[in-house]
Amino acid sequence: MRLRTDWRASVALVGTVLKYLSVPLVIPLVVALIYRDPVVPFVATIALTIAVGEGLERLSPEPDLDIREAMLFVAISWLAVAIVGAVPYVIAGWGTESTLAHPVNALFESMSGFTTTGATVLGEISLERHSHAIMMWRQLTQWLGGMGIIVLMVAILPEVAVSGAQLVESEAPGPELQKLTPRIAETARILWLVYFAFTVVYIAILYGLHLAGMAPNMGLYNAIAHGFTTLPTGGFSPEADSVAAFSAAVQWTAVPFMIIAGTNFALFWHVFSGEGHRFVRNSEFRAYITAIAGLTALLAGMLYVGTAPALAELGGVTEGVFENSLRQSAFQISSLLTSTGYATSDFVDWSSTGKIVLLFAMLVGGCAGSTGGGVKVVRWLIIFKVLRRELFTASHPEVVRPIRLGGNVVDEDAIRGVLGFTFMYLIIFAGATLLIALDVSRASAIANFSPLEAFSASLATIGNIGPGFGHLGPFGSYLDFPVPSKLLMIFLMWIGRLEIIPVLVLFTGGFWTR
Amino acid sequence: MRLRTDWRASVALVGTVLKYLSVPLVIPLVVALIYRDPVVPFVATIALTIAVGEGLERLSPEPDLDIREAMLFVAISWLAVAIVGAVPYVIAGWGTESTLAHPVNALFESMSGFTTTGATVLGEISLERHSHAIMMWRQLTQWLGGMGIIVLMVAILPEVAVSGAQLVESEAPGPELQKLTPRIAETARILWLVYFAFTVVYIAILYGLHLAGMAPNMGLYNAIAHGFTTLPTGGFSPEADSVAAFSAAVQWTAVPFMIIAGTNFALFWHVFSGEGHRFVRNSEFRAYITAIAGLTALLAGMLYVGTAPALAELGGVTEGVFENSLRQSAFQISSLLTSTGYATSDFVDWSSTGKIVLLFAMLVGGCAGSTGGGVKVVRWLIIFKVLRRELFTASHPEVVRPIRLGGNVVDEDAIRGVLGFTFMYLIIFAGATLLIALDVSRASAIANFSPLEAFSASLATIGNIGPGFGHLGPFGSYLDFPVPSKLLMIFLMWIGRLEIIPVLVLFTGGFWTR
Ligand SMILES: [K+]
Ligand SMILES: [K+]
């Protein structure tokens, strides 16, 4: 039986990706030299990436990717990078009490990094337990993951009908997110520039706050560490208390940058090109801002009247109940809706209703064309337009009414793709909830494991969000889950980040043969 | 502005329905005479139905219904019947401590009856607190609701694209569930006959068990009462402990009848016509039986190894752990999956994982063409086929592949309708969860109200299931909810029963004018 998919081409290109991975590995190596941490984990991994990369590249001298090879390429890329990225954790943890010495934990943390999920199995998040270099590598994996996502959405996702990316096209005709053309490299460069610029600005502001005395513990290390994890909507923090460890000024600063991270990066190009009006006219962006504002107002009101408690124990400077309510609300909603996953409050202790509001935010997701995960705003927008049309055609069966987005008609195939994707997302989320619950109860792994905990474990991983409720809250950890659950969640983070289809399709026979 | 929808025709026909409602009201009147209960509640309501019915009929002497008028008719019918059906509760409760003396509670109980939901706001379910006649009326409302559903799915739903009813057509070409034709009356009569026959058989078996000494407390009253609420997947019981009050023999007997109630009634016609092979070839039926068997096996295993506790306190004869596990599992899965809502165990006390398995059952729903509520099996079947197609076309974008059901191609419009309906269902369910949680926390109405309780309150009402988790468990009550939540849940039961669209469409401007 001859395979129709040229897997050698895909794997050879993965080799190139692995080779390039050696370059950013120099950053934690430099950090290790500065802080006199062990350098072996990074030197060994750099050698490994180059050796394996070179070897794989030889499989196909001039790899040429068609759609299928492209999907295979991205799926294997993320997996291979996550595996190699776990090596420094295992080497550094070897012989210590670090939870990352266990290969499954190391792979979990690495996949969580490169998929910008931010779910952690570090038992103790501290720079005493883990070296500065290892912690910076952990932060950096998210920033690299974000760069990968940008390539993914420019080059691959527009080829897959169920993605929302081709919808963005009709709204943002600047740097087009469109089919494979020679302009891909140019577009990717533009978006990378946006990503890089915001990262630098954010680090500068954080460190500036520190120098101005408004953020005592936000030194250069912490500023860079959070810079690496905000724009990719990552959410890893070297602080056990996440952003609650910092001042109110830092918390307020993070809010707009999380919102930027969840915005279609192509839109910023319009601003730089002097066409800022396109920005505010973009219907996905407007829906996104409306959702954030609406949920923030609702939650702030609840926090203010004391419905969601625990205000007294919140991190940051509690200047007043009003400011604090608004800040906690704006931060948590921006963080969970964009799938960043930072927290300034242990919302595990909030009221049921407060948690339900947060669950709503978690289900929305970022904009298409951003590094945000989840279902994504544009898909919900299309779904609501479809439902309005269904209601209309129920009493007007003779009328044919196209769905419009930003003035352009959306192709019915694309609509079917959006509905299909969202169902696939919800069904896998539900199925994984059941499997995780069965596994936890089989192993009696977590005491008083609630249905909400099971839901959130599934949603926070497939949605690349990070924290959930209960044991896996923002100040908690996924450490106590049994190994089968961890492997399942590694799978969920992987498929969630790649918009499901490019991975699942590999498990269908038709992909390989016909 | 002239309305395009002839509301007079719809309302006039509602008048006819109300007039006919006076006939079954004779049944509780007879029960009242037998048990020497007050007859005023029923005599007054009979007079009311005739008077109002006559009055409304005069709005339009020869009502002629087009699609819109038909939708308006069914929506108003269920509302009007629920309102009138609440009158006996209010009259009987007047001046007593009955919770049904409050009009909102009475309307809740009545809507819950006629929509065959089975959610209750009776504070104390007992024949000491409420008369035999009132309790029999409560049971009868569900049986009448079931009759209404049969007409609905024969005459109205096939007109609405999002319904699963037109899909049934391709699978069951016997008594067609199809467009408005003179055959409607004939088809409805056939299905009513099936419904009536199974009800009589079930009552006979229950009473036979009683006479044989295998069901001591299943006297004629109880046998009829449960006969009225099983085939319509209703779930009301005059016993506070639901079917846990009866012997294992009664519990085992109920299982196949609940499964029958959730089966497409048209299929039974084939059996009676000697074409039983069509039954087993029906793909929806096979998926339905597979889902019941699979979930039952999973849950029985969990109960057997003790994962879901509380076995010791179960109702019925505990002959052995194996038989008991299998019985509890088969009963609860059949009851919740078909949206009947009886219980033989207080699953509120089960483990988280046990509850998640039950939630899965609650999301499935009965078959199209049955009295079962929820999303319905045929829709999930279509959705899974659509997802398989999406995965295939992702790597074969050039291939056009139709969806088949029972050998026939399903129209793409129907597929879009199915996806649209299911999203509408899930989104309304989610939105109502939030509103109920906000209302409960606003009123501080229910202590320790959990997110799972909020989910289940919404799901159990829009899915016409009845019981949920926590306070609204199978042996619990919806009594403690604040009035706004109760009104919302009345709305959810109403739209859930009518497959959402025929009600929601009334709230769109386009329905009335264009
Ligand atoms: K994240
Ligand atoms: K029910």
Image: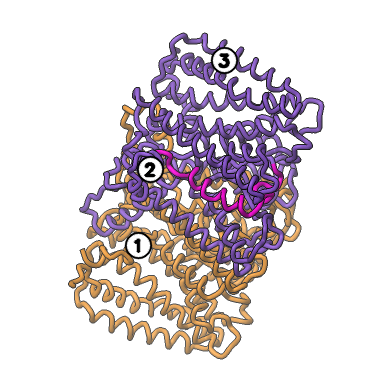
Chain colours: A orange, B purple
Q: Position of residue B363 (x, y in %)?
A: 51, 49
- Subunit bearing disc 3: B
In front: label 1 or label 2: 2
- Callout 1 environment at 10 Å: few (<14), some (14 to 19), or many (20+)? many
Of residues B218 and B66, the one drawn nearer to the viewer in this rendering: B218
> Is residue A491 visible in this depiction of the protein?
yes
Secondary structure category for the residue under label 3 = helix
Nearest to the eye among marks 2 and 3: give it.
2
- Which residue in the structure is indicated by mark 1? A152
Q: Is residue A408 visible?
A: no
Q: Residue at x 72, y 27 (%)?
A: B34
**Residue found at the very far left of the displayed protein:** A2
Q: Amino acid at mark 2?
A: Val
Q: Please provide percent x and percent y for residue B496.
A: 52, 37
User: Is B338 left or right of B180, judged from the image as shown?
Assistant: right
Q: Give the residue drawn at x 48%, y 80%.
A: A28
- Mark 1 lies on a secondary structure that is helix
Q: Is residue B394 left or right of residue A100?
A: left
Q: Which amino acid type is marked by label 3? A: Gly
Q: Give how far across and how far down residue B43 sits, in percent.
A: 68, 18
Q: Which residue is mark 3?
A: B53
Q: Which residue is mark 2?
A: B271
Q: Between B155 and A38, which is closer to the camera in this rendering?
A: B155
